[in-house]
Image: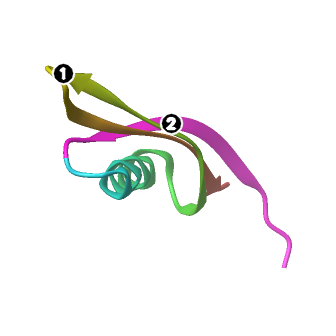
Amino acid sequence: MNATYKMEELVGSSTESFADAARNAVEKAASSMGEAAWFEVVEMRGAVREGMVAEFQVKLKVGCKV
């Protein structure tokens, strides 16, 4: 089966975990860009405030079928 995908790069964030940050980005992409078919984590980082982890951030590519 042949298919064509549009790929978007996004950054998801969460105060809970990297997995939650990725899930947030993928679900948002699926609701606004169309049928999300796959994702690839490109980078993981976070924010530190007052010596504690305050936010998890995940940069990812999401492929949506066109």
Dominant SS type (magenta): strand
User: Which structural element holds mark 1?
Assistant: strand
Q: Residue most toward the top?
A: 50
Residue 39 falls left or right of residue 24: right
Give the residue number, with chain letter if any, for mark 1: 49
**Could you tell me the amino acid type at mark 1?**
Arg
Which of the image's four quarters has the C terminus?
A: bottom right
The image's mark for residue 41 is none
From this view, report whether residue 9 is shown above or below residue 34.
above
**Where residue 47 sits in the image (x, y, percent)?**
30, 26
Residue 1 image point, x, y percent: 84, 79
Query: Magenta span has 22?
Result: no
Q: Please tell me how crowded label 2 is: few (under 14), some (14-19), or many (20+) other residues with Cα within 10 Å.
A: some
Residue shown at 25% from the left, 35% from the top:
55
The tag earlier along the polypeptide, 1 or 2, is 2
Magenta stretch: give its range. Answer: 1-15
Residue, disc 2? 10
Residue sitting at x 26%, y 25%: 48
The percent coordinates of residue 11 (x first, y second) are: 45, 35
Name the amino acid type tagged 2.
Answer: Leu
